[in-house]
Amino acid sequence: MTTEPLPRWDLSNVYPGLESQAFQNALAELRTQIEALTKFADDRHLAGGATPNDAPVGDTIGGFLDRMNAALNLYATVRAYVYSFVSTDSFNAIAKRLLSEIQMLSVPIEQVRVRFQKWLGAHGDALPAALAQNETARAHAFFLHETVEQSRYLMSEAEEALASELELSGATAWSKLQGTICSQLTVDFERNGQVEKLPMPALINLGTDPDEGVRRRAYEAERAAWESVKEPLAACLNGVKGAVITLNQRRGRADALHGPLDQSRIDRDTLEAMLSAMRDSFPAFRRYWRRKAQRLGKEVLAWWDVQAPVTETDRRLTWPEVQTFIVENFRAFSPGLADFATRAFRHRWIDAEQRAGKRGGAFCIGVPGVRESRILVNFDGSLDRAFTVAHELGHGFHGECMYRAGKTMLQRNSPMTLNETASIFCETLVTEAALNQAASADERLAILETSLLGSAQVVVDIYSRYLFEKEVFERRARAELSADDFGDIMLRAQAETYGDALHPNYRHKFMWTWKPHYYRNDLSFYNYPYTFGLLFGLGLYALYRRRGAAFVPDYEALLAGTGEASAADLAARFGIHIREKPFWAESLRVIERDIDRYCEL
C-alpha cells in the first residue's frame, strides 16, 4: 500500500461548490434551455402523428439539434460535477439531493427526444431533403439515420413519457440503492496485529496481497459481508432487470440482447464470431492458471489466488512513479497523448485515494462544459492499478480527440464497444513498455502476470458475466430470483468458463453484488464490449507496430469519429473484418503468445 497522500480530484474550474451561485445559475440556465427546447418542439409540431409546419424540414431538424446539443452539453456538465461528489462520498446528503434533482431534469429532455424521434421516424422520407437544406442536419446525418431506424422500437408518446417519469423512482432508484449499499459497507479486518475498518474496494484489493493467509481471510470476510446485504442487493437486481424486460417487450425488442447490440452498433454475427473465438481460447487461459498454481505450490487455484503475485519482486509504485511511467511511455506513441496525460495529472483530474463512501472500481467521466474528463481509481501501489490509470486516461484521451475535432454532444455518442478501444490501447502501450524495460526474469514474470490477469478478466471472466446476465434475463422474465438463485447462476457461469482451473469449492458466488454494470437499466450486457475493446485494441496495436508514426493521425481520427459510424464501418477503414472469426482469433493469439512466454519463464 502506498503511504504518500494520493490525489483527490479537483473540479473547482467547473463550479466553485455545490452551493455556489455559479452552480445555481447553471441549473437555472439548464431549466431555461430545456423549456426552450420543448417550446421549439411544440411550435414546430414535433409529434409522431403530426405533419411538418410551414418551416423547411431541414431548418426544423437543424434548429432542434442545435438546442438539444446545448441542453445535453450543460446537463452532462452539471451531472458530472455532482456525480463526482456522490461517487467519492456517498454520505454527502447535499450531493445526493442535487443528483436526484438533476436526474429529474433528464425526464423532459428524454421526453422531447422521444417526440423528435417519433416525428422523424414518421417522416423519414423527408430526411434526404433536410440534409440538403441544412448544414447542422447534414453534420448529424449518421445520428439522424440511426434515429429513424431506432424509432421502430418506441412505445406510444404517452407511454414513453410515463416510462421516463417512472424511471427515476424505479430502475434508477434501485441502481442508486445498490451503489449506496456497496460504497458504505465496511469490514473490520485484522492485519499485522492491527484491526482496520476497510471499505469494500480496499478489502477486495487485498486479493493481490503476497500473503495467502491475508488473501484467504479477505475472501472470507468479503463473502460474509456480501452475505449480510445479499437480500437488498437481490431486490435491486430484480427491480432493474424487471423494468428492462417490461420495456423491451412493450417496445417490440426481440430479446434482452437486441437493444444492447443496437447500442453497441454491432450485429449478432459479430458478437457470435467474437464469443466463439473466446470459447476457443479458454484452454490457453486454463494452462496459464495451472502454471500459476504450480508457481504458488498448489494443484489448483482458489478464488483468492487468482490475483496473487507470483514473484517476490512484486513491484509497488508510488503515485509520482506512476505519473512518470505513464507520461514517458505515452510520449513514445504520441506527444499529444503524453501532453493530455500530463494535464490530467498536473491539474488533478484523478481521484486515486481509497476511502469509505467512495465507490469501487474505476471510471472516466466527461465534463464537456470545460472540455475535460475526471477519472476515478482506487490506487493501492500495484502495477495492475497503474495499468488501470493508463486505461482510464485512454478513455479521457478518446474524449479529448472528440473535443479537438469540435464534435457536438450528439456526434460524441459512441457505442459501448468502441468506448473501450482507446483505453485498451493505452493499457497495451504501458504493458509492452513495462515488459521491454524489465530488469530481470522475475520482473518480466510479474509484468506478464499482471497483463495476463487483466486479459483473463476481460476474456474469461467477462464471458462468465455474459452467461450470468443472459440467464438472469431469461429467468427474470418468468419470476423474481432469490439471492441464492443469483449465486447459483454465477457459480455455474464460472464453472463453464474457468473450468478445472479453479477449485470447485472456492469460486465466488457474490460477484453479482458489487459490479455496477448489472444495475444499469439503460445499458444491459455491459460486459462483452470490454472484450470487443481489448481484442479490437490489440488489432489496432498490431497495425501501429507495423505502420509506426503514420498510424497516429488515422487512429486519432477514428477516436474522434466513433459516434458517427458503425463499428464494422470504422474497423473496415483499417482492413479489419469484425464479422469474421479469424480477426478475433488472431487478436487472442497475441494473448496466447504471452501465455507461452509466461509458462516458459
Image: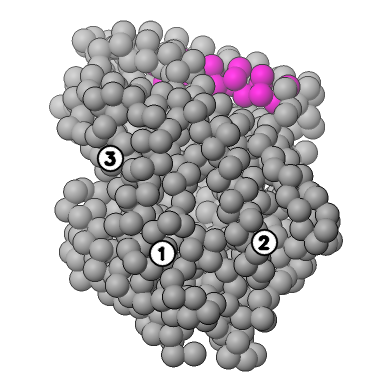
x and y percent of residue 296 in the render?
Answer: 54, 77
Relative image position of residue 196 (x, y in whole percent): 79, 49
Tell me the SS state at disc 2.
Answer: helix
How far, Cα to Cα, is label 1 from label 3?
Answer: 22 Å
By secondary structure, the bulk of the magenta-drawn segment is best described as helix
Instruction: Give, as a three-letter code, the residue at label 1.
Output: Leu
Which amino acid, by three-letter code, is at mark 3? Glu
Which residue in the protein does label 3 denote?
A: 471
Dot placed on the residue nearer the N-terminal end, 1 or 3: 3
**Sequence order check: which comes first, mark 1 or mark 2?**
2
Residue range (magenta): 94-111
Q: Residue at x 62, y 48 (%)?
A: 221
Residue where numbered disc 1 is placed? 502
For this view, does 185 lie left or right of residue 71? right
Q: Nearer the viewer, residue 95 or 183?
A: 183
Mark closer to the chain start, 3 or 2: 2
Instruction: Report the residue at 28% width, 23% height from top.
Output: 479
Eye-nearest disc, 3 or 2: 2
